[in-house]
Amino acid sequence: MTESTKITKSGFDLPKFEKGCVPRHIAIVMDGNGRWANDRGLTRIEGHKAGEAALLDVVAGALEAGVEFLTVYAFSTENWKRSPEEVRFLMGFNRQVLRERRDQLNVWGVRIRWAGRRPKLWLSVIDELKSAEALTSKNSKLNLTMCVNYGSRIEILDAVNAITQDVASGKIKPGSITEKGIQKYLNSNFLPDVDLFIRSSGEQRISNFLLWQSAYAEFVFMDTLWPDFDRRSLWQAIELYAGRNRRFGAAIDKPKLGNSK
Ligand code: IPE
Ligand code: IPE
Ligand code: MG
């Protein structure tokens, strides 16, 4: 398969990450397609098209780096506010990318999964997501979760409603729900906590992505517009992550020598 060799063999050298410095779960807000296109005198749709190669290259880079979970924001529950033409394009495009890339991703050992809501989402897109999930369900090299019609607040709200129903029916005792218990009710309950949260395009906001899961994530905001993003950008973000000191609320007392009064 020439296309797959083209993408896996980039010619770029993987930095030497120290042991334990590669995040287990990376989440990415793939942002900046519209600006990338408009800057070139093109329509926003051309920007989305150009974003496909970036995603494939980032998946290849994540495989090379040994990342276990890569979760990408492809269409938010708020993106329905866009023009009907753009929404229609994005639906068809998601379907097409899944159909055309699933074999290649399967060869790479990638397990594709979908996180998001059914209401409003085109049935043909759901079908394509389900076929990709079924085809790749035995793979374990990298878990690639496509967040399509995903919104974190509604994900939490859906979980709360399901929990209250189970309390009402006596399945769970009032007052007994735990943090792990809440996680189980999330639509994306197969995802571990996010270690590294990346957003391209210079915007520094979460935009309703993985709020529960990113409670202790490290954030890296990069100026690169998504169509210009590639595995080197991903590795750069991992290097920044590797230099961070994650404390999870704990503290170590280390007074500097010679500074005591
Ligand atoms: C991200 O790029 C892709 C989707 C939201 C589907 P945008 O379309 O948001 O691009 P900008 O932010 O307008 O440049
Ligand atoms: C977030 O980007 C959604 C996706 C990348 C799919 P947006 O471009 O929709 O977010 P805002 O509107 O800038 O917050
Ligand atoms: Mg945007």
Image (cartoon, rainbow, N blue to C red):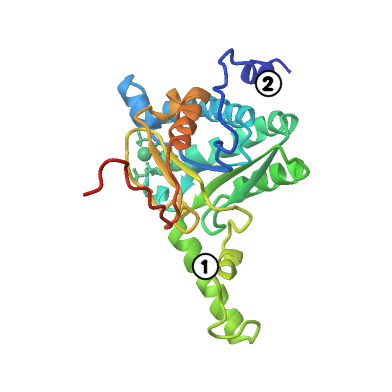
Task: Work out whether residue 63 or residue 261 is closer to the camera in this orientation and state it.
Answer: 261
Q: Quadrant of the N terminus?
A: top right
Residue 230: image location, x then y, percent: 50, 24
**Picture residue at 58% right of the left edge, 38% below the top:** 20
Q: Residues within 10 Å of mark 1 (few under 14, many from 20)?
A: some
Instruction: Provide the residue designation for mark 2.
Output: 4
- Name the N-terminal-most of marks 1 and 2: 2
When the figure is inspected, residue 29 is found, relative to residue 216, above or below; the finding is above
Task: Work out whether residue 88 or residue 177 is closer to the camera in this orientation and state it.
Answer: 177
Query: How far apart, in angstroms, are the residues tagged by discs 1 and 2?
Result: 39 Å
Instruction: Provide the residue designation for mark 1.
Output: 158
Task: Work out whether residue 69 or residue 4 is closer to the camera in this orientation and state it.
Answer: 69
**Secondary structure beneath label 2:** helix
Locate ligand 1 by image quadrant.
top left
Q: Quadrant of residue 57?
A: top right
Q: Residues within 10 Å of mark 2 (few under 14, many from 20)?
A: some
Residue type for callout 1: Asp
